[in-house]
Amino acid sequence: MNRDLYIDFAKGLATLSIIFIHTAFWSGQFYIPAEVRVFSLVFDVALFYALSGITSGANIEKTFYRLLKLQITYMIFVTFLFLLDYFFKVFGLTFFSLEWLQNFYSTFGSKYSTTSISAIPQWQNLGNWYLHQYTNADTFPVVMGSFWYLKVYYILTVLGVLILRFFPKHINWFIGLCIGLTLLFNIFPEYYPTGQVGYVAFYMAVFLIGNRMRGKKIPNKFIPVLYAFVALALTWMFWYYGNEIFYKINKNKFPPQIPYIIWAQFSLVTLFVLYNRFKITKENFITYIGKNAIFFYFAQGISSSLVYFFVVPLKENMSWWVLMIIIYVINILLAFAISAGLKKIDTLGWNILEFFRKKTAIKD
């Protein structure tokens, strides 16, 4: 079966959009206008859940094996991140001073504070990362700030494959249930549960709708209707909540609430409209990113942390939009280089695990 390059292309564009979002919302807090930061959310993380739904099937064993491989790759990455963070602190304390390190970390801004500057390794942080409790990595704060996606992805994929496997004739009912719960939580916000329930209720609907779209094509006559619905929903949102809701879209993302859900509809509709209509026939730079999306996702957390050190000295010397373009390009280039290095580290980690597997395997 030939690989659908449109999926890789869409993942690549979504990854580039995530890099732009993290460029705008992290280091961009110092110089990018709020309006631009909000507009960066037009193509957001919901696209990944929709694409995951399109590519997911009902094979439980294959899905769990894929998740296990992802978990091991994730553990290799956070182990590397933990050591990098720890050795940097040891370097700073040994050759400079605690004040130097505190000044270094102050580059990330007042909203960020370090968890522990110590020459003693905080092993509990590594254990928490393994178990998807994302305490900060002081040297690279954007990494853990973007990992909420991964936990929700695991939950969605496990529950999603169980629904696809055991309730294939009732998927529409589950979509309705997820939409109903999302509306219930938003109509009665006092009952909106904490934790992952709100995230899963909305994103599971996106995942399952994506799965229902698998192999299908939206008829031309429905396209204007879908975009008219999006326009109507946006108009209602600004009428009901007022124009100030525009600046609160990101706050309505964690967990997903009605304004953010409406805001995400344009990108989701566009994704499904172009699916099986916009053909990608040759591999390119964007499909490469899509094929290696997980490594770029890991890498952009590091690169989005590093670009702070370009922003701080430059933000007073040029127009914000020029600096934004420069920083975004630097972020992409750094993410590209770091992702290539992370792939090599991942290979090394798997080779080490294979070595220990062979050494500890029971021989007949």
Image (cartoon, rainbow, N blue to C red):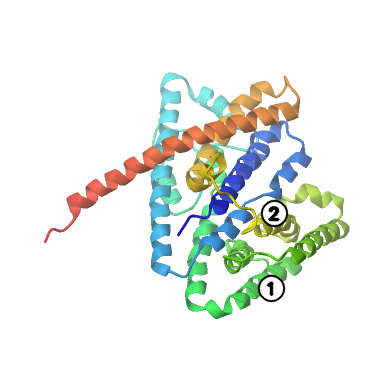
Against 296, residue 102 (above or below) is above
Q: Position of residue 107 (x, y in %)?
A: 60, 28
From the viewer's side, name the closer residue of 29 and 35. Answer: 35
Against 256, residue 79 (above or below) is above
Question: Count the marks: how many?
Answer: 2
Does the residue at mark 1 contact the one at mark 2 (Cβ under 8 Å)? no
- Report the quarter where the N terminus lies: bottom left
Against 334, residue 268 (above or below) is below
Q: Dot 1: within a 10 Å radius of its alpha carbon, few (fewer than 14), some, or many (20 or more) residues?
A: some
Q: Position of residue 264 (x, y in %)?
A: 70, 56
* Residue 168 visible in image: yes
Q: Dot 2: within a 10 Å radius of its alpha carbon, few (fewer than 14), some, or many (20 or more) residues?
A: some
Q: Quadrant of residue 78?
A: top left
- On the rendered structure, is 347 left or right of 89? left
From the viewer's side, name the closer residue of 180 and 2. Answer: 2
Residue 146: mark: none
Q: Which one is in front in this view, the residue at disc 1 or the one at disc 2?
A: 2
* Secondary-structure class at tag 2: helix
Q: Identify residue type, mark 2.
A: Ser
Q: Identify residue type, mark 1.
A: Gly
- On the rendered structure, is 273 left or right of 67? right
* Residue 115 visible in image: no
Q: Quadrant of residue 27?
A: top right
The residue sitting at 64% across, 40% down in the picture is 20
Q: Position of residue 48 (x, y in %)?
A: 58, 54
- Report the quarter where the C terminus lies: bottom left
Query: Mark 1 and mark 2: span between their CA atoms?
Result: 22 Å
From the viewer's side, name the closer residue of 102 and 187. Answer: 187
From the viewer's side, name the closer residue of 192 and 302. Answer: 302
Q: Position of residue 243 (x, y in %)?
A: 86, 51
Residue receiving disc 2? 267
Residue receiving disc 1? 180
